[in-house]
Amino acid sequence: MMQGKTWKIGGVVLLGLLLAAILLGAGLGTDYTDGYLVRISSAETFDFAGVSDDLRREFGGKLGDLRIQHGRENYNDQILIRAQKATEEDAARMTEIAKQDQADAYLRDFSAVKNARGMGKFWKDTLILCLLCAVGAVFLGYRQGLAGALAGLLAALVAMVFAGSLLSLAGVALNEELYLAMGTAGISAAMVLSFMLCDGVGGKAGLASGEEADTLAAKAWQRSKRPAMLFAAALAFVCLAGTILANGGLRSMMLGLLLCTLGAALGTGAFGFPVYLRLAHTRLQWPAAKRKAKKL
């Protein structure tokens, strides 16, 4: 667990990671920003999986966030492509790729799309995640006091910054589904792990014992390491398997969930729990611990 200078270094590294993601990362996806729509039609049914894979191989990472969907309109099969950056030449090349599957494929439409409600949707989703954080913090606060609530919130924040920054630097734009899934997974994992470690201290009795923070931390780790490690390892294994086996958007989703799990473990063990121990021994102790400390 991080102490002293190491804790500060970890904070600086996370801040640097966040700034790098803001300046160099992929940023928000087409669910939240403006973009372009390419509509390709055919009288025959496309092999959507094959065409989608070909389009991603050709344009993946070149046009910002790339969303590919399958649809039908007026008895025609359609491939709908949304991208943050695209030109008429890109649309023509996409049509050529589709023609390799269906020779009669043609470019039905290429147009700019204004997403006037995009940022409003982003802040609405952020509010949903903040409410989820609040629910977790209330539960931790009820069981572990204000120090426990703050530890859970800090762990959740670290999980989101860690996962979101690395994913953005890897070139994956943040869309609504990915944002909500990552946020839910990261916050939930951080709160559960925070509860396991903080509960391992022994609650009010443990804090009132007068033992040093390092001693309490060692005891908490011995009590909680098996369930905490099994919980984190199981989540990480499922997400890693999904990252390896999935394709396209689902792979990005599973990678995001994997990074959130790792971020939650990092945020809890390296930031949240040490802060809990420090605060619980000062102004944010349980009332029983304060009375015990005064007698000593």
Image: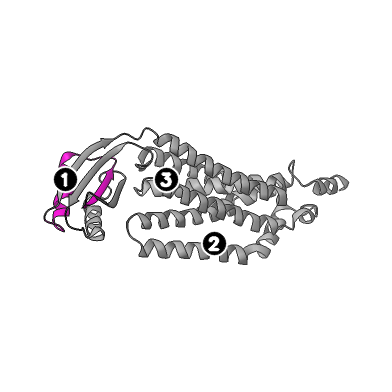
Answer with left or right where residue 214 lies relative to residue 34: right
**Sequence-wise, which precedes: disc 1 or disc 2?**
1
- Three-letter code for the amino acid on which mark 3 is drawn: Glu
Q: Circle 2: is it few (<14), some (14-19), or many (20+) Cα within 10 Å?
A: some
**Sequence-wise, which precedes: disc 2 or disc 3?**
3
Tell me the tag on residue 232.
2
Q: Is residue 1 visible?
A: no
Q: Nearer the viewer, mark 2 or mark 3?
A: 3
The alpha-carbon separation of the residues under discs 1 and 2 comes to: 47 Å
Read off the residue under disc 3: 176
Asked which secondary structure carries label 3, the reply is: helix
Q: Percent from the top left, x then y, of residue 93?
A: 15, 47
- Three-letter code for the amino acid on which mark 1 is drawn: Leu
Asked which secondary structure carries label 2, the reply is: helix
- The answer to which quarter of the image holds residue 50 is bottom left
Tell me the tag on residue 107.
1
The alpha-carbon separation of the residues under discs 3 and 1 comes to: 28 Å
In the rendered structure, which segment of residues is drawn in magenta? 75-103
> Is residue 83 or residue 161 the one in the foreground?
83
